[in-house]
Amino acid sequence: MTDQTDLRLTPQRMAVLEVLRAAHDHPTAAEVYEQVRRTSPRIGSATVYRTLALLVSTGQALELSLGGGAAARYDANTCRHDHAVCEGCGRAVDLDHPVPDGMMAEIARRSGFAITGYDLQFRGICPDCQAQGAGSIRVGGPASPQ
Amino acid sequence: MTDQTDLRLTPQRMAVLEVLRAAHDHPTAAEVYEQVRRTSPRIGSATVYRTLALLVSTGQALELSLGGGAAARYDANTCRHDHAVCEGCGRAVDLDHPVPDGMMAEIARRSGFAITGYDLQFRGICPDCQAQGAGSIRVGGPASPQ
DNA sequence: AGTGATACTGAGATTCGTTCTCAAATGACG
DNA sequence: CGTCATTTGAGAACGAATCTCAGTATCACT
Ligand SMILES: [Zn+2]
Ligand SMILES: [Zn+2]
Ligand SMILES: [Zn+2]
Ligand SMILES: [Zn+2]
């Protein structure tokens, strides 16, 4: 778990961070790996997974679990924001929405929890999928669990 | 995906539903399996997984993805409700909270999505874990991913 | 440069939750 | 009963994520 000791900024880590920063579509670890490979063909998947975990633990990326058995997705946009997930194509778009203030305090009071944060995602059908698959959802069917 | 045809209420399915109804702690599929085994030792895990998926698809149970790489959890309480998940012990407690009305409409308007629902979970430390692990979280460390 | 300590990498094996496969069992109904 | 569709269970297969470990890179100090 890499203590708070050294922490080197290696070419591999830079490559991963670069790819993640460039991607605005909440890629999975596998997708990041795929992409990083194009510029660093010798990188291993373990390194990508390790680096993503490192970025998350140092607050430079967010890990999203967008429901279902879907793989975790990563987001270089570390400002608090929520997502709308399309049940047709699996895409997730960012939402910038005012969070009901006082809600967390209320939850904390009622549950006795020390609330540290929350995750909110909306489910629905994106405009694209509404347009084409008017009747039959999940035509091209990504978004499928494992 | 089991058309809308027959759909039998077999002893196995009854057993799974019974266990899920009796459990109020959002068990994972593996935990349901474990439990069902006590009364139906010959049941297979595939049947449990299939039945849980069936219950979810017929609206008799909810499937929760409480973040991280944790396994899916199931909930026989199908009334809309949210959860507070303890980052110490992994437990999830039910929350009955008034959902900010008009929020979904607003999200729908801004994103163009046809919103069908949402998932909201709060993260925090439960009263128990606050009491004992005052300083060091995740001592006994369940809640760990796969 | 040389030396040792420490951090990092990558290939492949491993883990583990979940789904798939398919032959056998079950149940509905005439 | 006989037929036919559904369901079951054992085990194989799958896939995401993690672990192992020998080899490599980088650092600190000489
Ligand atoms: Zn879509
Ligand atoms: Zn985002
Ligand atoms: Zn706890
Ligand atoms: Zn619940």
Image (cartoon, coloured by chain):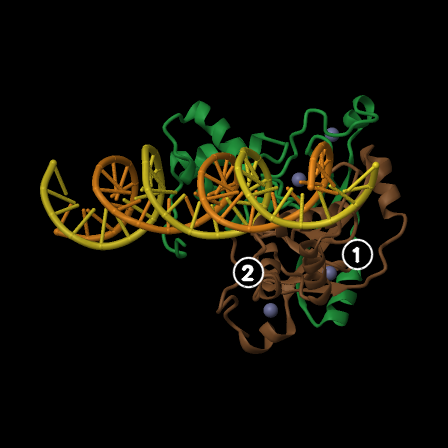
Chain colours: A green, B brown, C yellow, D orange
| Residue depicted at 88% across the width and 42% down the height | B105
Q: Mark 2 vs mark 1: give the one in front.
A: 1
The subunit letter for the residue under badge 2 reads B
- Residue at the bottom extreme, as displayed: B131
| Residue depicted at 64% across the width and 70% down the height | B126
Specify the amino acid type for callout 1: Thr
Q: In the rendered view, would you say B37 is above or below A90? A: below
Q: Are marks 2 and 1 in contact (CB under 8 Å)?
A: no
According to the image, label 2 marks what residue? B143
Q: Are marks 2 and 1 on the same chain?
A: yes
Where is residue B143 drawn, in percent x and y? 55, 60
Q: In the rendered view, would you say B135 is above or below B16? A: below
Residue B36 visible at all = yes
In which quadrant of the rendered image does the N terminus of chain A lie? bottom left
**Is disc 1 placed on a helix, strand or loop?**
loop
Queried on whether the Cβ of the residue with tag 1 lies below 8 angstroms from ligand 4, the answer reads no
| Residue depicted at 55% across the width and 77% down the height | B132
Q: Nearer the viewer, residue A64 or A98?
A: A64
Q: Mark 2 or 1 closer to N-term?
A: 1
Where is residue D6 drawn, in percent x and y? 72, 41
Q: Decide if residue A136 is on the left or right side of residue B26.
A: right
Residue A80 visible at all = no
According to the image, label 1 marks what residue? B78
Specify the amino acid type for callout 2: Ala
Image-quadrant location for residue A126: top right
The CA distance from mark 2 to mark 1 is 24 Å
Query: Total number of numbered labels?
Result: 2
In which quadrant of the rendered image does the C terminus of chain A lie? top right
Q: In the rendered view, would you say B133 is above or below A97? A: below
